[in-house]
Image: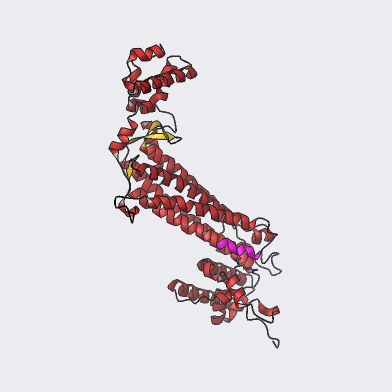
């Protein structure tokens, strides 16, 4: 070649290379290098396919594979030199390979960085969704252990942050288990949606070369339950689509919302006003000024991080909205947001497990809080209903009983039966039995309710799910 061209891998039609500022501005290797293992897996599968269809020789394939393995080992050992002038993870690895293996010049046959990055990210998403789901399961196991250790503890359940009705603490903790289980299910959906191989879509319109897309899909594990390869059905959509990225960020954002609600309950419960629980020193912090303080910082950060997870989702939605098909460089900006969603969610899941593992219930405080007979006012209305009183009338009558107790500054269950009967004649001599907590819970026998038989069932169910 006589003419002077740009040193960039794509530089054939350029006479000069990019400005230093442009390199700094456009590089992504500082954050996409974490895709290296997936990029190399993709290149090995791609070169194996090129050999299988005769576009490269078996010898060239083997040289490429050996070179890629050596590069991966170097990266894992921290000895690989990343160069921002080479823009991204793809070109850093290709350049390193080219230095070692002449056949590397054939690796990019029938491939574009557009289908390459789409493939790398789908591999990463499948893997990361699985790891995150595993971490959430570990937090769920800590939750189940906490429920088991406090099987006999009752607490008030709240609506409007006002004491509502008594529940076993385990029933409340099981509610959190349900939330986290849905998070795991969503992550499994993300992994399933990511399980389609874009490789072979090329830059936008495939290739004229006789490639075998099913081969690569199979080699990379993009297969259905029966082992059949799954390839993306439209080459333009394959390189433009970021839906599954957004779904992953959605799963993380919703996980964050759950974390935040769990954390908020724990912050309230650990306050002196409630004092239902004590957090382990290991996940609490002190005040630099007030020596008496023990602050629930771990939970506050779980709550705070959820804002960040929502922000990442918003970034991705805004990034993709309004982009013309197909690939646009804007899409490179998907990675910082999505990697951050993973990193923060993974960290939060670990911290949640740590917080729950160190939590102790204050039995006296819980017992005192749940002993308020007013929590069973609804049960008293149900008592009247069973005596044939229409619920609306029963509700009204019990309201009057509550008002009487408040006025007389007396516990609800200490009111004289004669006065209660003046409010409604259907109250019998046995009305006060309603306030027996054990009896009240035993009556809640229906599915999903906090009665002891149902709670026992849920313990069994969760043990099975989380085994
Ligand atoms: N670093 C790029 C990204 O993350 C890879 C794809 C680049 N494709 C291109 N045509 N410049 O999106």
Compare residues 354 and 302 and report the one nearer the observer.
302
The residue positioned 29% from the left and 52% from the top of the image is 291
**Residue 124 in the image, given as x and y percentages of width and height:** 53, 61
Q: Specify whether 176 is left or right of 371.
A: right
Q: What stretch is highlighted in magenta?
A: 324-335
| Vertical position of residue 227 compared to residue 442: above or below | below
Quarter the N terminus occupies: bottom right
**Residue 21 in the image, given as x and y percentages of width and height:** 60, 75
Q: Which residue lies furthest to the front in this view?
A: 289
Q: Residue furthest bottom?
A: 2
How many numbered dots are placed on residues in this image?
0
The residue positioned 38% from the left and 48% from the top of the image is 141
| Vertical position of residue 45 compared to residue 57: above or below | above
Q: Which residue lies furthest to the left in this view?
A: 364
Visible residue check, residue 192: no
**Residue 297 in the image, given as x and y percentages of width and height:** 38, 52
Q: Specify whether 5 is left or right of 398.
A: right
In magenta stretch: residue 147: no
In magenta stretch: residue 334: yes
Q: In terms of image quadrants, where is residue 218?
A: bottom right
Q: In terms of image quadrants, where is residue 435?
A: top left
Compare residues 434 and 401 and report the one nearer the observer.
401
**Residue 369 in the image, given as x and y percentages of width and height:** 33, 33
Q: In terms of image quadrants, where is residue 28?
A: bottom right
Compare residues 409 and 124 and report the one nearer the observer.
409
| Vertical position of residue 4 compared to residue 143: above or below | below
- Name the quarter showing ligand 1: bottom right
Q: Specify whether 210 is left or right of 86.
A: right
| Vertical position of residue 42 compared to residue 175: above or below | below
């Amino acid at each position: 070649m006589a003419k002077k061209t740009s040193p960039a891998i794509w530089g054939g039609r350029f006479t000069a290379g990019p400005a230093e500022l442009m390199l700094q501005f456009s590089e992504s290797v500082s954050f996409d290098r974490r895709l290296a293992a997936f990029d190399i897996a993709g290149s090995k599968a791609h070169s194996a396919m090129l050999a299988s269809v005769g576009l490269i020789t078996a010898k060239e394939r083997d040289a490429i594979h050996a070179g890629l393995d050596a590069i991966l080992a170097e990266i894992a050992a921290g000895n690989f030199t990343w160069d921002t002038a080479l823009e991204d993870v793809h070109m850093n690895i290709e350049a390193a390979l080219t230095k070692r293996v002449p056949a590397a010049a054939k690796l990019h046959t029938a491939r574009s960085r557009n289908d390459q990055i789409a493939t790398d990210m789908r591999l990463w998403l499948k893997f990361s969704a699985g790891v995150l789901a595993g971490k959430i399961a570990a937090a769920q196991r800590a939750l189940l252990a906490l429920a088991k250790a406090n099987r006999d503890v009752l607490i008030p359940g709240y609506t409007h942050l006002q004491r509502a009705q008594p529940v076993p603490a385990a029933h409340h903790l099981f509610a959190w288990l349900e939330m986290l289980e849905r998070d795991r299910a969503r992550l499994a959906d993300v992994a399933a949606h990511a399980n389609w191989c874009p490789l072979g879509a090329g830059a936008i319109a495939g290739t004229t070369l006789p490639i075998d897309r099913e081969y690569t899909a199979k080699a990379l594990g993009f297969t259905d339950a029966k082992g059949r390869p799954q390839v993306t059905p439209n080459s333009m959509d394959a390189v433009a689509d970021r839906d599954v990225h957004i779904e992953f960020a959605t799963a993380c954002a919703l996980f964050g919302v759950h974390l935040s609600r769990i954390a908020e309950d724990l912050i309230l419960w650990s306050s002196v006003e409630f004092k239902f629980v004590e957090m382990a020193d290991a996940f609490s912090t002190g005040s630099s000024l007030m020596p008496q303080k023990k602050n629930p910082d771990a939970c506050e950060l779980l709550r705070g991080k959820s804002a960040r997870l929502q922000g990442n989702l918003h970034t991705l939605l805004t990034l993709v909205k309004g982009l013309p098909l197909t690939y646009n460089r804007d899409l490179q900006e998907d990675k910082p947001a999505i990697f951050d969603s993973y990193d923060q969610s993974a960290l939060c899941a670990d911290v949640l497990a740590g917080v729950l593992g160190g939590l102790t219930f204050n039995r006296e405080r819980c017992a005192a809080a749940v002993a308020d007979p007013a929590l069973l006012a609804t049960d008293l209305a149900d008592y009247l209903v069973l005596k044939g009183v229409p619920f609306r009338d029963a509700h009204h009558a019990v309201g009057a009983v509550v008002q009487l107790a408040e006025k007389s500054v007396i516990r609800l269950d200490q009111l004289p039966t004669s006065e209660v009967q003046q409010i409604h004649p259907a109250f019998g001599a046995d009305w006060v039995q309603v306030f027996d907590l054990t009896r009240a819970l035993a009556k809640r026998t229906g599915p999903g309710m906090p009665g002891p038989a149902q709670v026992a069932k849920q313990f069994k169910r969760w043990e099975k799910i989380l085994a």
